[in-house]
Amino acid sequence: MEREKSWIFWWLMPFMSYYMLYQNCLSEQYFCGNSCNISATISRNQAECCMNYTDNVLNGGNLSDTLRAIWTLEKVLEGTEVNGSMQLYVKTFVALLHKPSGPFGGLEIYANDTKVTPDVPLLNSKVIVQLPRELGAGPNNTFVFCMFKWPETNKSVFESPHEVYDQRLVGLSVQGKKISGLQERINITMEFTKKIDETQKPSCQFFNYSTYTFREDGCVTHWTHRQNNITCSCNHLTYFGILIIPDPSITKKDQEILTHITVIGCSISLFTLVITILLFITNRKLRQDVSMKVHINLVIALMLLNLHFLPSQAVAAGSSSGLCLYMALLLHYSLLATFSWMALEGFHLYLLLVKVFNIYVKKYLLKLGVVGWGVPAMIVSVVVIIDRTFYGLTPLDASNSSSTAM
Ligand SMILES: *[C@@H]1O[C@H](CO)[C@@H](O)[C@H](O)[C@H]1NC(C)=O
Ligand SMILES: *[C@@H]1O[C@H](CO)[C@@H](O)[C@H](O)[C@H]1NC(C)=O
Ligand SMILES: *[C@@H]1O[C@H](CO)[C@@H](O)[C@H](O)[C@H]1NC(C)=O
Ligand SMILES: *[C@@H]1O[C@H](CO)[C@@H](O)[C@H](O)[C@H]1NC(C)=O
Ligand SMILES: *[C@@H]1O[C@H](CO)[C@@H](O)[C@H](O)[C@H]1NC(C)=O
Ligand SMILES: *[C@@H]1O[C@H](CO)[C@@H](O)[C@H](O)[C@H]1NC(C)=O
Ligand SMILES: *[C@@H]1O[C@H](CO)[C@@H](O)[C@H](O)[C@H]1NC(C)=O
Ligand SMILES: *[C@@H]1O[C@H](CO)[C@@H](O)[C@H](O)[C@H]1NC(C)=O
Ligand SMILES: *[C@@H]1O[C@H](CO)[C@@H](O)[C@H](O)[C@H]1NC(C)=O
Ligand SMILES: *[C@@H]1O[C@H](CO)[C@@H](O)[C@H](O)[C@H]1NC(C)=O
Ligand SMILES: *[C@@H]1O[C@H](CO)[C@@H](O)[C@H](O)[C@H]1NC(C)=O
């Protein structure tokens, strides 16, 4: 019996000591309370705990809790003990604290999703911040940069009616100073990876804690369509985000006018196409010309296109999905047929002009017809076979799924 007991003891011994060692190591790790404390001296560990706590609140708390947590985090980071520069990474938060030992000579900050550095460009820099000398950070005034992403699940950041680009917010502050009305502006450049709709534009805005709203004043947005970065020039510091707002240069009214112009233009086109066909049918001399026959095929393709394009909004407004599918199919087919007959017109012209003499192609028109009407049919069939749901309703205004569809 005794022997057996000691055997068990020796057998357990290595596991026990490992467990004790492991426990010891764990206790050396900093213990995080469930809050952020603003005290006289804040260590790196406490700051990281606060970031962790803020992240938890961000993911689960209500709006007022979240705002208070972010505000507290800013104060905690400002009060964190730092010599020179310090980088902090916790979950989606990246932060840079900078306490210049001498006079502040301006600073450039580069940040991506996982790293932030002063003055050194990073791989995939998402945000670049240029700070003017005027900021006056100093030995008693730590500069704080903090960037994080709002959780994907909650689309309405700070109850803003507009989308915040990339759910990303950038916070800037200087310990013990209320920075506003700068002569030289702070530049925040953000990379764009997502395409912005034609009817929308980005707008640099800051969060006003006293009104709980995003405001634009004091910030200038530098951006043009198709530019893949945006620069915000602001004359004060706080939390900044890029809001995607409707572009007033293409208003609803403009869209209506454009729709009318389209309808009128297509109707005129349809009318003259019909006249062309009538002329062709009634005139025997025209009917015998090979070139005319090629033109007439193009005319028919264009007519089909107009016929199926014009009523497309009306069909979309009705609820028949079968009719919608038919219209979409035929619209696609006639558009492709227009392309192919346009190409055949070019081919025909080439034969006429370049190989003027002695060409004779057997069953020339039949062959053209097979290509002109057959290739589009083949493409449409393949699409239908692969995925029929490819054809369906599309909103005219991509940003508003309940807007007029076609
Ligand atoms: C961060 O928060 C989570 C969730 O509350 C917790 O499980 C984790 O231990 C925290 N991390 C640290 C380093 O305290
Ligand atoms: C903050 O203070 C409370 C009580 O004073 C304490 O329980 C908690 O652990 C502290 N939190 C941190 C992160 O130090
Ligand atoms: C948010 O939650 C806290 C508790 O976590 C509660 O005290 C507070 O009243 C809540 N605020 C709102 C607006 O629901
Ligand atoms: C900063 O430097 C001082 C004096 O050189 C030192 O006492 C302190 O521990 C340092 N703090 C940090 C966070 O490195
Ligand atoms: C951020 O930059 C660092 C250093 O250039 C790089 O190692 C890291 O992969 C980058 N992170 C992302 C998400 O691109
Ligand atoms: C920000 O950009 C403007 C020009 O767009 C420039 O005049 C200003 O000096 C820049 N600010 C910094 C801190 O570089
Ligand atoms: C920083 O603060 C300390 C104590 O609060 C003060 O003695 C010192 O003069 C301050 N330094 C500057 C540059 O303001
Ligand atoms: C989004 O935030 C609101 C409060 O602003 C909260 O009631 C809701 O549960 C959140 N939704 C998710 C999916 O977290
Ligand atoms: C926030 O809004 C209030 C009230 O409109 C205003 O007094 C305050 O100056 C604003 N804050 C900033 C930083 O613009
Ligand atoms: C922003 O984009 C413009 C043109 O697209 C480019 O010239 C400029 O260098 C970019 N700036 C940064 C900081 O990437
Ligand atoms: C979306 O379109 C519908 C119908 O035209 C309109 O009533 C609604 O106001 C639009 N919503 C937005 C956000 O523009």
Image (cartoon, grey):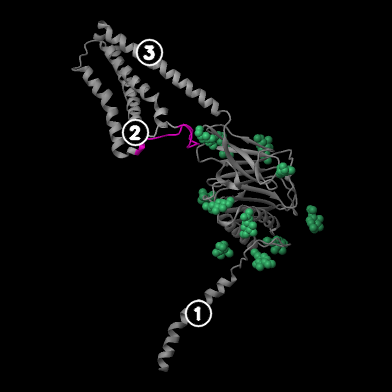
Q: Amino acid at mark 2?
A: Leu
- In the depicted view, which residue is nearer to us: 86 or 361? 361
Label annotation for residue 17: 1
Q: Quadrant of ligand 9?
A: top right
**Left or right placement of residue 122 versus residue 266 in this view:** right
Q: CA distance from mark 1 to mark 3?
A: 94 Å
Q: Amino acid at mark 3?
A: Thr
User: Within 10 angstroms of label 1, few (less than 14), some, or many (20 or more) residues?
Assistant: few
Corner quadrant of residue 203 = top right
Quarter placement of the C terminus:
top left
**Residue name at image x 67 percent, y 56 percent:** 72
> Mark 1 or 3, which is nearer the eye?
3
Q: Secondary structure at mark 3?
A: helix
Residue 128 in picture, x, y percent from top left: 60, 44
Residue 137 in picture, x, y percent from top left: 73, 49
| Among numbered discs 2 and 3, the one appearing first in the sequence | 3
User: Where does the magenta region start and end?
Assistant: 389-404
- Residue occupied by mark 3: 272
- Residue occupied by mark 2: 325
Quarter placement of the N terminus:
bottom left
Find out if the beta carbon at label 1 lies less than 8 Å from the nearest ligand 1 atom.
no
Q: From what the image shows, is residue 11 above or below residue 303?
A: below
| Among numbered discs 2 and 1, the one appearing first in the sequence | 1
Q: CA distance from mark 2 to mark 3?
A: 28 Å
